[in-house]
Image (cartoon, grey):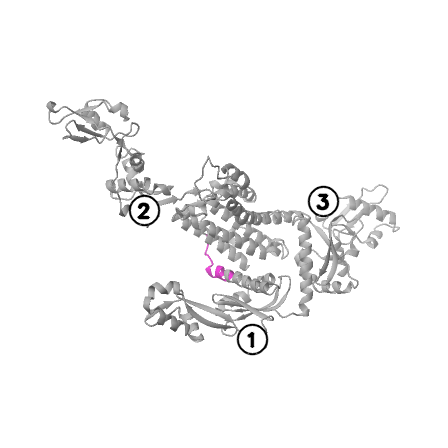
Amino acid sequence: MQEKRFHNWLENARDWAISRSRFWGTPLPIWISEDGEELEVMGSIEELEKRSGMKVTDLHRHKIDHITLPSKRGPNFGVLRRVEDVFDCWFESGSMPYAYIHYPFENAELFENNFPGHFVAEGLDQTRGWFYTLMVLSTALFEKPAFRNLICNGLVLAEDGKKMSKRLKNYPSPMEVIDDYGADALRLYIINSPVVRAEPLRFKKDGVYGVVKDVFLPWYNAYRFLVQNAKRLEVEGLAPFVPLDQATLRNSANVLDQWINSATQSLVHFVRQEMDAYRLYTVVPYLLKFIDNLTNIYVRFNRKRLKGRTGEEDCKTALSTLYHVLLTSCKAMTPFTPFFTEVLYQNLRKVSSGSEESIHYCSFPEVQGKRGDRIEQSVNRMTTIIDLARNIRERHNKPLKTPLREMIVVHPDAEFLDDIAGKLKEYVLEELNVRSVVPCNDPLMYASLRAEPDFSVLGKRLGKSMRVVAEAVKAMSQEDILSFEKAGEITIATHCLKLTDIKIIRGFKLPDGVTEEQMDAAGDGDVLVVLDLRPDESLFEAGFAREVVNRIQKLRKKSALEPTDLVEVYFNSLDKDTSVSAQMLRSQETYIKEALGSPLLNFSMIPKHAVVIAEETYHNISNCDFKITLSRAALAFNENAILELYSAGNTKYVQGLQIYLLSRDHTNLRSEFQLGNGKIKVDCIENQPAVDVGLGEHVFLTVGDYLASTKA
């Protein structure tokens, strides 16, 4: 727009006929004598009144066309009459920056302190209209441009590329789009389209749905995950969630906390920087990447912490980090998504004292603390490694539920390898389901290198020298390539070539005695990932456990259970030899308990009073058949201990106590035990003596608790 369309128009600027032969419009302030020899231009109402001797109250044609000026040559030369023409309306529009405040007759200081304005915004069709007249007039009058920045939008066309037409009805109703997907989705779709770069947009309703799917649903899911787990604290009888302050969170030892805090500050910095430069179109792609990182890395990799599986304090740190990340990102994105961010903010502000009534009253966030460029780079590289490993698995039809023995990460940077084999290791192992990660900083151990010139970059620059340089680049040895990567440049035939001029291609070099089916690799830039795909019987049990956990999670989802819903899971083997699956589940007991948040129980333990929510049978899962049953958390009784409560060991009393406890609301019963430090007094059963019932002694809130106590 700036360097082509507008530049070309200015370069070949045609004469501008500033007048129009019309009635309505601003009259040209030109008076001319009948013989055409005398011409005067009036500069103000005051000047016109003084010159004509008449009072002027209105500048429209029908109010001033009758006004004449006496000739300065004398009465014999008659009078001067106003020419009939009016101004081209774009002349008036182009005078807007000063005319709207009646400059120079008023507001001179205001104008001089603020001109030129920070930005103007209009459509592409004003290249030869308003943009041009603004520039011509301000250049002629002030020798300045009329604006510091210009936001120019292209045309929004129908999906078929034609202009939108009411007659043809070739576009969806705007209100229909807003009703279906919301105003924010429509706004983001347009901001992220070519139309804000002065290019045409073929409007597609499906594109607005894409924004809902790719931006708002993941964003909302991260928010919902926070709310669900904050509520879970209260369900479990802990103190209500109050976020820790950001100064405390900046000292978190968790690497993903450090990373997401840094990434959030980078988002704030980026949005400020791009908005200061009026680049609307760069923000949404960056936001998409940020939300993807938030949901698919921070929330996904931190589920155990956010669900409280790593301790109450660690859980509060993770939840507080997620809270502040969501709050800050909402504030940063409010100008783009005003309605969605307001809805989230109204709930988030409930746990923060002294917050503004509306997100639109909040200041735009400032960058706080230092951004950790290195940790951001390491996590980005980690995601690259994970993507490469997934690609290898897909190529060899090895699903993520199938555990693998080993992954080798080849990279020349020792610090990066330390991160992958150190503080990021647990996330890599869990996400890729591999037993070990082996760092390797010898780039030639598993790879062969070759260099290729980037013809698209070098062609125009080198011209006839291209052939000589290309041959020399292709002939570079492995050592030459490594030296070039380290130095960042190389001189060939007097030409200095940079890293962007030469493509380094890494080919996988199989170790001796290993086939492609047993080991494979994938690379991206200077990183190479090698996966050991050889089967290992010791990994079979872990694979079966993953399959079982996967089926349980899907059954929970199918049953519309919330993460905070407490259920117990029972496993019932349908095989002739039940010992095979039992042995595998025993060996993977710790993993299953961590993944589910509760133990996997044998179906033989399900109480008669258990309320079954869902059941499903599965066949040929790692050569096993089994049934999964989900039930509401059910009380379990230590009948021998209860018998001892009553002097004669009266079984009738035992039954009465059990019926009473089973009739109680499970959540209320839990709260009473917590208030009584693990004990409650039961004195309301007719014809039965009062007794003190101990939690973990006489009664257990879940079958899982009872099982744990018997094992202990």
Taking the spot 32% from the left edge, 68% from the top edge, the residue there is 464
Q: Position of residue 488 (x, y in %)?
A: 40, 68
Using the numbered discs, state the Cα–Cα distance from disc 3 to disc 2 in whole angstroms: 73 Å
| Discs 1/3, front | 1
Q: Is residue 132 left or right of residue 710?
A: left
Q: What is the magenta range?
A: 368-379
Helix, strand or loop under label 2: helix
First along the sequence among labels 2 and 1: 2
Q: Is residue 412 left or right of residue 217?
A: left
Residue linked to disc 1: 511
Kind of residue indicated by mark 3: Asn
Residue linked to disc 2: 6
Marking on residue 392: none
Helix, strand or loop under label 3: helix
Image quadrant where residue 163 sits: top left
Q: Are marks 2 and 1 in contact (CB under 8 Å)?
A: no
Residue linked to disc 3: 668
Kind of residue indicated by mark 1: Pro
Q: Position of residue 584 (x, y in %)?
A: 72, 64
Q: Is residue 232 above or below residue 45?
A: below
Task: Tell me the crowding category of disc 1: few under 14, some 14 to 19, or many 20 or more residues within 10 angstroms, Cα based.
Answer: few
| Discs 2/1, front | 2
Q: Is residue 145 left or right of residue 336?
A: left
Is residue 377 located in the magenta-colored stretch of the structure?
yes
